[in-house]
Each structure stands twice: as structure tokens, then as C-alpha cells.
Image (tube, rainbow, N blue to C red):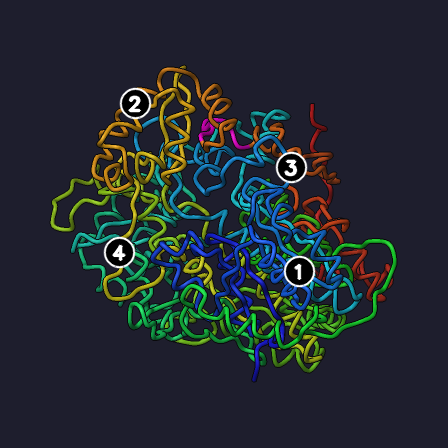
Amino acid sequence: MTGPLDGLTVLDFSSGTAGALASAVLADFGAEVLKVEPPTGDPSRSHPAWLSWNRGKKSVVLDLTREDDRARAQQLAAGADVVIESFAPGVAVGVGVDYATLSRLNPRLVYASITGWGQEGPLAQVPASEGAIAARSGRMLNFEGEPNRDGPVFTAVQTATWAASQAAARGILAALRERDRRGRGQWVQTSLLQGMLPYEPRLIARPFSRRDPKTFSPARVTNGQPTLQYIPARTKDGRWIQHANLMSRLFHAYLRAVSLGWVFEDERFKDAPAMSEESREILRDIMLEKMQEKTLDEWMEIFVADGNVAAEPYLGAVEGMTHPQFVHNKHVVTIDDPRVGPLQTLGVLADLAETPGAVGGPAPDLGQHTAEVLGRLAAAGRVSAPVSGGAEVVSGPPRPMLDGVTILDFSTVIAGPYGAAMLGEMGARIIKVDATPEREQVRMMGAANALGGLKLYAGKECIQVDLQTPEGKAIVHQLIARADVLLHNFRPGVPERLAIDWETCKAINPRLVHMYIGAYGATGPHSRRPGAHPLPGALFGGALRQAGASMLPPSDQPMTLPQIKEVSRWLMRANEGNPDPNSSQAVSTSIMLGLYAREVTGRGQAVQATMMQANAWANADETYNYAGRPGTAMPDADCYGLNALYRLYRAGGDSWVFLAASTDAEWQAFCASSGRPTLAADARFATSSARAEHDAALAESLSALFASQPATEWESSLTAAGVACVRADQDSGEFYEEHPQAIANHLSEQAESPRFGKYTRHGGIVRFAGVPGRFGHGSFGGEHTVAIMTELGYTAPQIEELRTSHVIHWEEVNRIPAAV
């Protein structure tokens, strides 16, 4: 079996992680990826994980400052299917590989741009980095209170990079699918700034807090103990374990598994986890004391054997890759690399049963394939036609990229629902199938009466059906017959009981893409265990990196209960919600791989992704291993940043800036534009190695410097000089609503809900030139039940009868007063 992208050619001009991860997905599923590098090589080659990101690719050296090499690049693009680039806006034009130029040579070309700040706006030319963009957009401020200090907090996991990479990947796949149908290529556009949107909580919340501050608090979450269901706890051997027993039945299973079932006989705790604040804190102490009675391994053996307790240890990335389920799923593979020996790298992002992907050979040496690839051009002797065939050009008005695709979304909580919602922004029709109130166990933040639901249910049509009735199954089977994709996150065995498993669905609709997003996967030693977002956050090092250096006390250090509670608080703040939207990115990419494969084969198939693998990919700067692997770069103890030139500083007027000036050229530019040329002349700071040796002294000098004027002045003067030094203390909701950079790149859209009225929602994470997206409101439970039932052919009396018998349901509209 070959991958679904077999026969496609991708030119990857990008540098850095986002483009590398996007093209890695394409390479893993069969595309030939030609990495086009300058004579000095991709600057990211110095990163020790580069070998992992670029496995299975070919390297071609072209100097785009030379006319002959520009001509070669253009000739390669004329015969390619996809181009990926990460130049700052305007740079590609100067070297002749911009979309306008290449699409004239190859009208069927799919061209993907991954910028830092977007194509337009006052910050578009500021040097891009995850840190600078996280700081300026307010994401770092959203971590305030993680360490016991005020102000923004460095964000360690490269979430925007991951989201942008998958926005590019799914955008490319959607554009290829449309090209094969309509005969023309497309310009796919995303950015790290757009990649911040999945992790942004305040764009929706801030306007609602102005409307009704009592109901919708304007305050950010800055401190406080975690919920009991999500509590991190210290074990007997001084290690830490993360719990994720979101639903009451799982929390009850945990209490029984740790021999605390007696609490339900105590009047204070009988309704746990729902109880008074005083009772909750008493039970917290009981739980934390109990967890110190056994070692981590002993507790994990009990929890795995129980099968209904969600818990995993806090590990570093490399140790997380040894998890038995991770190994079973082939989420980690070993390739022989001629430079470092056996290289453990991540397996393919998704499991496509009929058209599986496969990790290729080792990453290329610089220019390893130049002669081979340019030899093709010489043999062709002319500008070649695109490699793949396709339809004749079909004209007509622009329509959303996934117009005509129907996705049935049975998933709950966040990872699955948000993955579907992102495809809805691209034009897919999403029918959200929820349980009736009698059967519903949890919609949690996905519940449409919560602000979280406005994001997770955005643009969806909602129907409530009791799948445990014959009539409910019949309704759903009619929907399956008409659908292109079914998405669920039920543990193994549940889809069979609900009659929405792959074998049942295949008999109804052989062209269906059946997508499963699970915590662990469909088979293997942990497949039947529950999971939620804190677990992959703990397993793959993201939470420990976010917590900062030396936050965890040594395992043999005695700790009092108050000290344990403080570490528990800090850990859970560090283990924030990013693993859910990290998983959503994998969901949307996996579905697009399945849809594109169907275009190739004419058949549907079972597709699977896991939260484990999605978050291992999201931490791809750390999830690799080989002999002599460098250690993990950790933020300092107070979580300001990684080093003196990539960190937060308190500026004048109690404001904050973030500086990203890691290279020699950036350091020289900073010294010149900040009016401190003596810093560059100081022998302690004259070279990168000297700066690393004297990092603490440099940070002290810069702290004094930045305190001399406010953040806004530093940003104005330094960004004008091409230095990435940005304000870091603006509320994220305010940034996305009001900042010219956000406005110029359409990072927010207006929606109108029957319940909430008009409100501001997030914009598209990926956009297509000249093609509209769809940015609907967040629907509430059963909002479209009657319309969907009518579409299926049910009459009004039949619909009412089914509602009376509790087979279907819809909520009544309780409109919130209009915004003021």
C-alpha cells in the first residue's frame, strides 16, 4: 500500500519548525519533499531536533540571490504540486519565488505561506519567533500567577508553531483536493500569530465581561488550587502524578481505587466532587496524604488494572516516548542516521488503515540531492508540466474550500469538537450530534451554554439524539449515509454499542472517513483507559518545561503538606489547556488526509489519531533521542525565559517587554538601536559563546536598561530598527479585538447567536486567497434538531412524538441581553 500523497512533489523553502513539521506530514504520507536550502543551509540545521523534523526529505541547494538559481527554482516550481515558504512578507517577491510569479508558471500550484505575524499590519516585518508572538499577543500574560510573582510568564511549549504547521498542512490538503476537482491551484496563508488563536481564551470572554461582569468575570485566572479531578500529587518516592478524572464517575472510580471510597459515607463528601469549598479543601488534604502511601509505579499499576482511572506521571519528553502505549502504537520509530547513529523520532501523525503513512530515511545532508534533482531539469530541457494530472479548470464564484463536505461530530469535550470546528471555518458542514439530556454525561466546556461552547460549537448544526434507542440509531444511520466524515472520541467498545463503529458505518456508507481521536488509541495495553488533556501535558515534558527550572523539589526531599499543595498548584497552572487544542490540530489534519485519500482511492477508511501522538508532535523540539542528545532547554526558576536574549524583562512604568535577539546580527542591531554600543564592545558579550558564559551578567545589565523607559517606547524604537522587542503586558482579548496587527489580518470575526446576540469570535487559522471562510455562531444543544429531522423526511407530528418519547431533544432559546 502506498501513501495517499504518493506522486506529489513538494518544494519546501521554509526555515524553522512550522514549515518543517508541515512538510514532514506530507513526506510521511508519500509526497516527495525537496527541501530547498541556501548555500549556508537552513539556519535551523543547528537545532538538534532538525534531524527528526526533516526525515524522509531531500536537500537541494539553490542560491536565490543568483539569477540562474532563481530560474532553477522557478523551473522546479513549474513541475511541482506544492510550495511551502516562511519568508517575511515581500521577501519571496525579491527572490522570484512568490505566489504570483510561480502560479503564472504553474496555475495548478498549491502555494503555502507561513509567516510570523501575518501578511499585513505594522508588525509584519518584525523578526518572527514563538516567544515574541506569544508575548505580544498576550498569551504570556495569561500565565500570570504560575510562579509567585506578577507579570507575564514565558511560554515554553511552541503551540503557535504547532498550530500553524497543521493549519498549513490541512490547508494544503484541502487546496489539493479542490485543485483536483476544479483544476486550479491556491495560495494558502497562515502565520504563527494565527496559530495562537486556538489557545486564546479572552477574545470571546472580554466582550461578554463588558456586557455582564457579574456573570462573565473580566479577571484572568491567575492562581488558586486545581480542581480535585485534575489534581497533581506527590507519591511516596517523591515523584509526581497527574490526575484527569473529569467526569464524576471517573472521580468516584479514582477514590475507590485509592481506598477512599469511604468518603461517600461522610456527609461532607457524599456528593463529591460537588461540595462546599471547606469540604473540598479537606478532601484535597486527604487525597494528597493518601497519594504519599505508595510509589508512583505502585499507583500506576493499580490505576491501569482498574481501567477507569485517568492518571499519568510527570515525565520529560524522552522518557514519555517509552510509555508502553506509545511504543505499541508505533508513535516512536528508530531510523539509522549517519551523523548520530540510531535516531528515535516520532512516528506518523495519524493511522490511515487503507493508505498508511511511513517514516522515510534520515534527514539529508546539505545539498545531498542537488545533482539528482537538477539533473531532472537538465534531462527535461524545458519547463515541465505539474507532476500530477487533474480536472480541467472549472470557473464559477468562489466558495469555501470544503463546501459540500459533511462531518458528523459525535466527539465530546474539546479535542474532537474543536478539530471539527476548524474544518467548519474552511466551509465544511458540521452536524454536532449530542446525547439527549437523559443520556448526556458531559459536554463540559463544549456545552453550548458556556462561552467555551461558542468556540467549540462554532458554525455547527446541533441535533440531540438518544443513541441507545432503536429510533435514535435509525436517525443517526440516515445521517451517516449522507455524510463524508464521522468523528468520535469514545473508548473502544462504546462505538459498537452505539452502532457507529467502522464496520457498521462502512456497510451503510463505504465512502465514509471514520475518524477516531482517543487519548491512547483503539488497541494496546492502555486503550480502554480514560484520558483528558492534562495527561499528555504531563507525559511529554510540556508541563515540566512550563513550570521552569528547579520547580520540582528533589525526590528525596521531605515536604510538608502546604509545600506539596503549592507545587501541585504550580504544576497544574503549568499543565494548562494546550494539550486539547494541540490534539485538535491532529484531528483536522487527519480528517483531511482521509478525505484526500478518498479522492485517490474512491473509498473511505478508518482513521485514528491519539492525544499522545498529537502532543508529542506539538513538543517536537524535544521528542527525539539519540546518543549524545543535548539536554532540554528550561526556563529559569522565575519563568522569564531561556536566556538573557530570549526572555521577558520588566520595563519602566511597571510594564513588560520580551526580547528575542539570539543571533550575532540581532545582538549587534539591538546594541546599536538601544543606544548601548558599549554592550557589544564588552568582551563578556562580544560573541555568542561569551554571552552564554556570562548570561546572568547580561540579563542583569539588560534589566537595568529596560527599566529606563516604558515597554511601548522600547517596542516602537526597536521594532523600527528590525529588532524583535515587543510589549508583553497587553490583555490578549484586547490585542485580538483592537490591535492594528490583529485587525489587518482578520483575526476576529463577527457572529450572531439566537441566544447571545452579536458577539466577536476568532477568525480563520488558515485562509485561502479569494476564497471565503465560514464563521458561524456557537450553536446550543439541539438548536437544529427540527431542521435536520425535517431534512431527513420526518413530519412535524413524527418529530413531536420522538421528542415526547425522549429520542430527540432541543433546548429552548433563552436570549442573553444584547451587548452594551
- Secondary element under disc 1, as helix, strand or loop, is strand
Residue 678 tag number: 2
Dot 3 amino acid type: Glu
Question: Picture quarter containing residue 469?
Answer: bottom right
* Residue at the disc numbered 1: 433
The answer to whether one can see residue 130 in this image is yes
Q: Residue furthest bottom?
A: 1
Residue occupying image coordinates x 17% and y 52% = 238
Q: Does residue 446 appear left or right of residue 483 in this picture?
A: left
Pointer 1 local density, CA inside 10 Å: few below 14, some 14–19, many at least 20: many
Q: Could you tell which of marks 3 and 2 lies nearer the N-terminus? A: 3
Q: Are marks 2 and 1 in contact (CB under 8 Å)?
A: no
Residue occupying image coordinates x 73% and y 40% = 753
Instruction: Tell which of 208 and 293 is nearer to you.
Output: 208
**Alpha-carbon span between mark 2 and mark 4:** 33 Å
785 is within the stretch colored magenta: no
Pointer 4 local density, CA inside 10 Å: few below 14, some 14–19, many at least 20: few
- Secondary element under disc 2, as helix, strand or loop, is helix
Q: Could you tell which of marks 4 and 1 lies nearer the N-terminus? A: 1
Q: Report the span colored magenta.
A: 725-732
**Alpha-carbon span between mark 3 and mark 4:** 38 Å
Q: Does residue 238 appear left or right of residue 209 in this picture?
A: left
Q: Identify the image quadrant of the C terminus.
A: top right
Q: Identify the image quadrant of the N terminus.
A: bottom right
Q: Could you tell which of marks 3 and 4 lies nearer the N-terminus? A: 3
Q: Disc 1 or disc 3, which is closer to the eye?
A: 3
Q: Position of residue 557 (x, y in %)?
A: 12, 46
* Residue at the disc numbered 3: 120
Q: Could you tell which of marks 2 and 4 lies nearer the N-terminus? A: 4
**Alpha-carbon span between mark 4 and mark 1:** 47 Å
Q: Are marks 2 and 4 in contact (CB under 8 Å)?
A: no
731 is within the stretch colored magenta: yes
